[in-house]
Image (cartoon, rainbow, N blue to C red):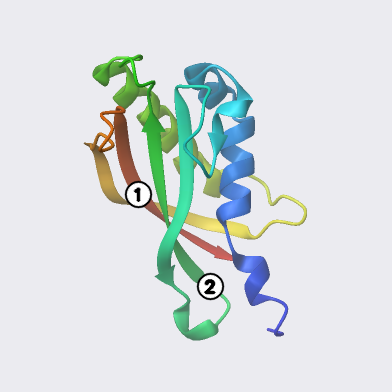
Amino acid sequence: MTVEDLPRADPLPRVMAWLSGHAAVTAAFGGADRVGAVNEPPYPRLRVIDTGGDDRDLRWLIAQDIQVEAYGDLDGAPGKAELRRILYVALGALAELPDQPPAVDYPIITSVRSLRGGGWVPEPTGQPRYLAAVRVYAHP
């Protein structure tokens, strides 16, 4: 492995691209523009961020923790049950990722494991939110 290899093992760009282009996720959230790293309209929205992980002593394989958050609108739409359902559509799509062929310019995803199941955690503003976390194993 070279010094340039480890940064290429970051799975977050691949996860974002996969979720943004996944037909079931797009249908559940109402469009490809609903996946990103920030909580902003239009809603419902899927926020995907990295939250640490394990760099495996800076070796070939890394394990990145990724938090997945499904946000609803401040008016409460969609409802709590629907927001949970669409969060799990996204988690189901992530579970498919290791079975996909390698994508050019992205790391190879070898495994996606649940870290934290979907939980109801509204924002302090009252904005509806369900969140979960997965650990994504990848190498360049």
Location of residue 69 by image quarter:
top left
Q: Residue furthest right?
A: 104
In the rendered image, the quadrant that contains the C terminus is: bottom right
Residue located beneath label 2 in the image: 61
* CA distance separating discs 2 and 1: 19 Å
Residue appearing at x 62%, y 59% in the figure:
108
Q: Residue furthest left?
A: 120
Location of residue 1 by image quarter:
bottom right
Location of residue 20 by image quarter:
top right
Residue 87 image point, x, y percent? 37, 30
Residue 68 image point, x, y percent? 41, 43
Q: Nearer the viewer, mark 2 or mark 1?
A: 1
Residue appearing at x 45%, y 33% in the figure:
90
Residue type highlighted by circle 2:
Leu
Residue appearing at x 45%, y 66% in the figure:
63
Checking the image for residue 133, the label placed there is: 1
